[in-house]
Image: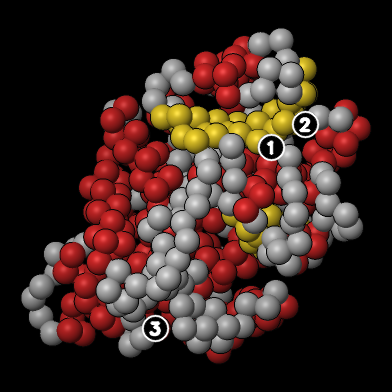
């Protein structure tokens, strides 16, 4: 295991009917901006519940944050905060709303062009407004980490950022908020959480035995509950998905072990260029990524085959093939297609995708920094 320091200041409030706790979590004199997405929070009553819990505090609202939050939309929220002199943010939604709120929190007091926050991956952030979240869609783990991803429509750029200044102060996780979600969003949540764990686990052995078993337990839980989540509104199943998705990316799985993230970086270009759901780009890229890089990942792929999928028969090559196929089949069982042609993307798109990776500096990806544009090209070709 590598040396590491683990720090996560986010307070998690987990359980049914916990939105009422906002009254004690948000400062009594706060001037609050409530940020949300496309309207589901309004339709299902969550927004009214949140506003009621905030009581007599001064409240402004900002809706319309996209499923892939855009710089253009978020900058309107920044302007509103500056005009109204608001001092506390509350994200009500899934990972996109929380990611967007993190950017807004950092951009309000940023000296300079706020897009620099993304261009420098958060390195220039020195302060941010305090904020909390009410999670309605388990998927990204953004409710308990300090990272986010924002898209700029004008340049088709989708970039990640991270800063210790943008941890949520608190996040409310009420599994009942998932009961009205459509199957597509739930499937995306399962696939997103699964890939988050894989990016931190399927690299190379470093004697991180605790982290390996933790990761494998999360993956096995997702395999067990994944199909149930789509068809069974059981509160216990939804609660387990919500907690797994949070743990998948709160920093603990990856503490002290090498991490990959090349699947995410390649997937971001598919979302930016073609508008494909983030989780679905991961389901397309991950199996191909594992196939192309099977030699560098051999030892962990064999471990993954045995411990997650219980594959023990056959040669090493057969076991690796079977594990990759089981991964693809798992995504397909969630009604998520795993080939670029399923999204009407052909080989003629690859040159532009590689050019975007190069333009964004994504030329030395992966745990070994060996995913060059040529390797990314081979991964995309294998995704066709």
Q: Is residue 329 visible?
A: no
Residue at image point 74% right, 56% down:
125
Marks 3, 2: nearer the viewer: 2
Residue at image point 89% right, 57% down:
112
Closer-to-camera residue (168/151): 168
Residue at image point 59% right, 16% down:
23
Residue that label 1 marks: 130
- Density class for disc 3 (Cα within 10 Å; few <14, some 14-19, many ≥20) is some
Residue that label 3 marks: 293
Q: Position of residue 339 (x, y in %)?
A: 44, 68
Quadrant of the image for the N terminus? bottom left
Q: Position of residue 126 (x, y in %)?
A: 75, 54
Label 2: state its secondary structure.
loop
Between the residue at mark 3 and the residue at mark 1, the CA separation in whole angstroms equals 41 Å
Asked where in the image residue 312 lies, by quadrant, the reply is bottom left
Residue that label 2 marks: 87
Between the residue at mark 2 and the residue at mark 1, the CA separation in whole angstroms equals 7 Å
Q: Position of residue 226 (x, y in %)?
A: 30, 46
Label 1: state its secondary structure.
loop
Compared with residue 268, is residue 71 higher up or lower down, i.e. above or below?
Answer: above
Tag 2 and tag 1, C-beta contact below 8 Å: yes
Compared with residue 28, is residue 224 higher up or lower down, i.e. above or below?
Answer: below
Query: Which comes before the other along the chain, label 3 or label 1?
Result: 1
Tag 3 and tag 1, C-beta contact below 8 Å: no
Q: Position of residue 375 (x, y in %)?
A: 51, 86
Q: Is residue 86 visible?
A: yes
- Density class for disc 1 (Cα within 10 Å; few <14, some 14-19, many ≥20) is some
Q: Is residue 37 left or right of residue 365?
A: right
Q: Is residue 334 left or right of residue 353?
A: left
């Amino acid at each position: 295991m590598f040396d590491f320091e683990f720090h996560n200041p986010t307070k998690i409030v987990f359980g049914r009917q916990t939105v009422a706790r906002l009254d004690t979590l948000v400062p009594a004199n706060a001037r609050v901006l409530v940020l949300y997405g496309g309207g589901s929070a309004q339709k299902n009553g969550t927004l009214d519940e949140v506003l009621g819990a905030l009581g007599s505090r001064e409240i402004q609202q900002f809706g319309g944050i996209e499923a892939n939050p855009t710089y253009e939309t978020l900058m309107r929220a920044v302007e509103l905060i500056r005009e109204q002199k608001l001092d506390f943010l509350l994200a009500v939604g899934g990972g996109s709303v929380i990611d967007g709120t993190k950017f807004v929190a950092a951009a309000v007091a940023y000296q300079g062009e706020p897009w620099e926050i993304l261009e420098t991956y958060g390195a220039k952030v020195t302060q941010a407004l305090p904020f909390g979240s009410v999670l309605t869609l388990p998927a990204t783990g953004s409710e308990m980490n300090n990272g986010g991803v924002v898209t700029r429509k004008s340049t088709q750029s989708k970039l990640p950022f991270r800063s210790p200044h943008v941890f949520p102060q608190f996040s409310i996780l009420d599994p009942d908020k998932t009961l009205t979600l459509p199957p597509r969003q739930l499937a995306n949540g399962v696939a997103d959480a699964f890939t988050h764990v894989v990016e931190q686990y399927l690299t190379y052995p470093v004697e991180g035995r605790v982290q390996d078993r933790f990761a494998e337990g999360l993956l096995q839980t997702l395999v067990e509950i994944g199909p149930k989540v789509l068809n069974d509104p059981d509160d216990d199943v939804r609660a387990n998905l919500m907690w797994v998705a949070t743990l998948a990316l709160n920093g603990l799985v990856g503490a002290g072990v090498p991490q990959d993230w090349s699947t995410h970086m390649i997937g971001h270009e598919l979302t930016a260029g073609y508008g494909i759901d983030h989780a679905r780009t991961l389901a397309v890229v991950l199996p191909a990524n594992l196939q192309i890089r099977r030699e560098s990942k051999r030892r962990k792929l064999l471990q993954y085959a045995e411990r997650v999928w219980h594959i023990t028969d056959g040669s090493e090559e057969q076991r690796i093939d079977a594990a990759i196929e089981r991964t693809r089949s798992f995504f397909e069982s969630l009604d998520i297609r795993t080939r670029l042609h399923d999204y009407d993307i052909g080989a003629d798109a690859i040159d532009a995708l590689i050019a975007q990776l190069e333009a964004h500096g994504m030329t030395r990806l992966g745990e070994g920094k060996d995913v060059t544009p040529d390797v990314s090209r081979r991964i995309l070709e294998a995704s066709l």
